[in-house]
Image: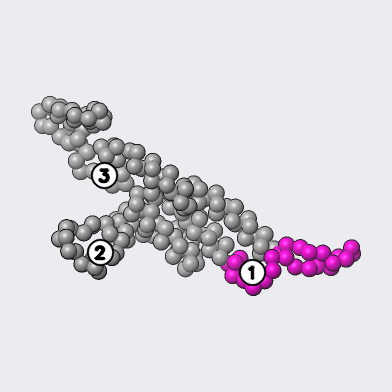
Amino acid sequence: MKAAKGNPGRRPLRADAPDGGAAAEKVQRLGLADYPEFLTHEREREIFRRVVEDYVLHRIARRPDLTAYARWAHYVHRWCICKEALDGKATWYKSQSNHGEMLRRHPMFKDQLDIERVLQSLEDRLGLNPVARQNIVRGLAAIPAPLAGLFADEPDDNAGKQQGGGAADGAQQPAAATPVGLLMH
């Protein structure tokens, strides 16, 4: 959006802006571009792609989480199928029995409710609702900057130098002025 409006302040634009394709590039670089084989429908793949691109960009999704996100995409697709089948119909129907006419729940509505329970559970765990996402982001923000690289998906080229392994004569580098700096050496 900033690139479309122009840049009157002449400051450099963020390199990870979604419109620059950085999310797709990061997904590709981390090896997350392949869809799990059980996502066979195009809608499932599209739901998965949208969530994973956004969540990888914001450091919420990691490689081990992809199966859970794919399961969630599958369940959303199944929920949509139930909704489409019920559009314009009642959630109940009348049936005849030996005791007279009875009202019963539509089987697709029962499926939709069951899928909804599974979705709610997965959304709470994966950060796919606002409260759960805020908890994840809050947890990521609580990690001090020097420790943030410990959990990165990509190896850091300077990791050996930060731990004192880069000095040729074996001398330790001086500790940082902050208490977190002690963890670096």
Q: Give the x, y percent position of residue 136.
A: 41, 45
Residue 101 painted magenta:
yes
At x 89%, y 63%, the residue is 99
- Residue at 38% x, 41% y: name it: 139
Q: Select label 3 or label 1 by which is in front.
A: 1
Q: Which residue is mark 3?
A: 155
Residue 123 as seen in the image, left or right of residue 27: right
Instruction: Give above or below for 183 relative to 27.
Output: above
Classify residue 119 as left or right of residue 56: right
SS assignment at label 3: loop
Which portion, as a residue range, is magenta?
81-106
Q: Earlier in the sequence, mark 2 or mark 1?
A: 2
Residue 183 image offset from top left, x and y in percent: 26, 29
Mark 1 burial class by Cα count in 10 Å: few <14, some 14-19, many 20+: some
Q: Residue furthest front?
A: 8
Amino acid, disc 3: Pro
Q: Amino acid at mark 1?
A: Leu
Q: Provide the secondary structure element on which disc 2 rests.
A: helix
Q: How many marks?
A: 3
Tell me which numbered mark, 3 or 1, is placed earlier along the sequence: 1
